[in-house]
Image (tube, helix red, strand yellow):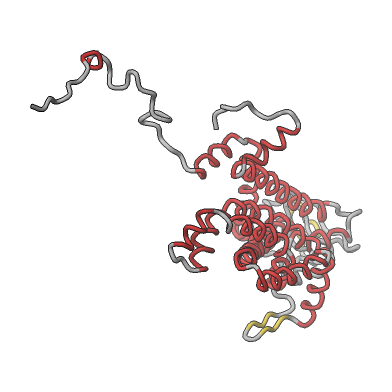
Amino acid sequence: MAFEPQPDPALLTRGPEEGFPPAPGGAGAEGHSPWYLAYRRLLRNRLALASLGLFLLIVVFVLVAPLWANHVADTGPNTTHTTEKVTVDGEKRDVVSVEGKPIGPLWFSAGGKFFLGADSGLGRDEMVRLMYGGRTSLFIGLTSALITTLLATILGLLAGYFGGRIDSLISRILDVIWSFPVVLLGIALGTALAVGGLKIGPLELAGNSIWIPILIIAVVYTPYMARPIRGEVLSLREKEFVESAVAQGAGSLRIMFGELLPNLWSTIIVFFTLNIANNMLLEASLSYLGAGVQPPNSSWGKMVSLGVESIYTSPLLAFAPGVMILLTVLSLNVFGDGLRDALDPKSKVRLEARAGLAEPEGTPV
């Protein structure tokens, strides 16, 4: 005769969870992705958010250039007013004096015309040129950073994953570019291409094309991003998830772009943000030295170069674009540092631990 086991009456008087350890994180605990946690950390970094806000204001400032030019200044960035006059508080004044000195900042005295004055010699509206020059500088910085990121990611993945001869070939090409000082290499390429233009197969660019400095900047900065990515790929390819993908029959492309690339996004995003600032600085340096943006195009670097010629009589012509470069690069660098700390908090913890400032364990994220 079989007997069925009966429950202990003592257990019937206790709750379902009494006497048992709680589930890790609680039964209703909600998990968060690393991206959400990084977003939370970034929100607590007020300095990084303020820098991002400043950069967005600068972007809005340059994007409304057509509105200011058409509805306020009533002139274009390359329109000259050498022999014209402007009405200031009911008085006619020369835009460029007989001695060649341009009119100074008028602010709103002339209804917004020549808000920052005129440039020397040609009498172009400096405020309009500042806004349009910012569009050029930001376009070059963003586009060259995108090209640099694309080239560096592909080269870093190929070199780090395959190794061997492919790694040696790619690494030696990057070493050759790395061995040249960035500014000197940019000046050499910019000067040569500004004279003869660029023609590679169906691709043909004139010497004054804005794409020439974009391509130069993108190429010379590629090694500075490709080598760290290659190092991370060398480390990631030895991980268990890659071995598991190989065991399941995944091909090289699937492993590189489906397994390795998602683990590189945080590094790529931080490098992209910082590359924009570095690329804008290099563009300003090349344009200042005459090897970057060529006339009739204008950028902040080109405006600084032209403004230095009249630094004693009209210092604002050089200071205004210089301050815009400073604010843009500073905001991007500070935001990039905050983004790095948010995506890789261990790096900041290690630095603080060395200084004795690390937070105690258990601090909420």
Is residue 205 shown above or below 222? Answer: below
Q: Position of residue 344 (x, y in %)?
A: 61, 43
- Residue 135 picture quarter: bottom right
Q: Position of residue 327 (x, y in %)?
A: 73, 47
Residue 75 makes an appearance in the image? no
- The quadrant in which the N terminus is found is top left
Is residue 222 shown above or below 356? Answer: below
Is residue 151 shown above or below 62? Answer: below
Is residue 351 shown above or below 216? Answer: above
- In the visual, does 24 lie left or right of 215? left
Task: Find the residue positioned furthest to the front.
Answer: 1
- In the visual, does 253 lie left or right of 127? left
Residue 14 makes an appearance in the image? yes
Q: Where is residue 212 in the image (x, y as percent from the top left)?
A: 71, 73
Query: Residue at position x 74%, y 78% from top?
Result: 207
Q: Position of residue 290 (x, y in %)?
A: 83, 69
76 and 64: which is toward the camera: 64
- In the visual, does 278 lie left or right of 153? right
Query: Residue at position x 64%, y 28% from top?
Result: 359
235 and 62: which is toward the camera: 235
- In the visual, does 330 lie left or right of 251? right
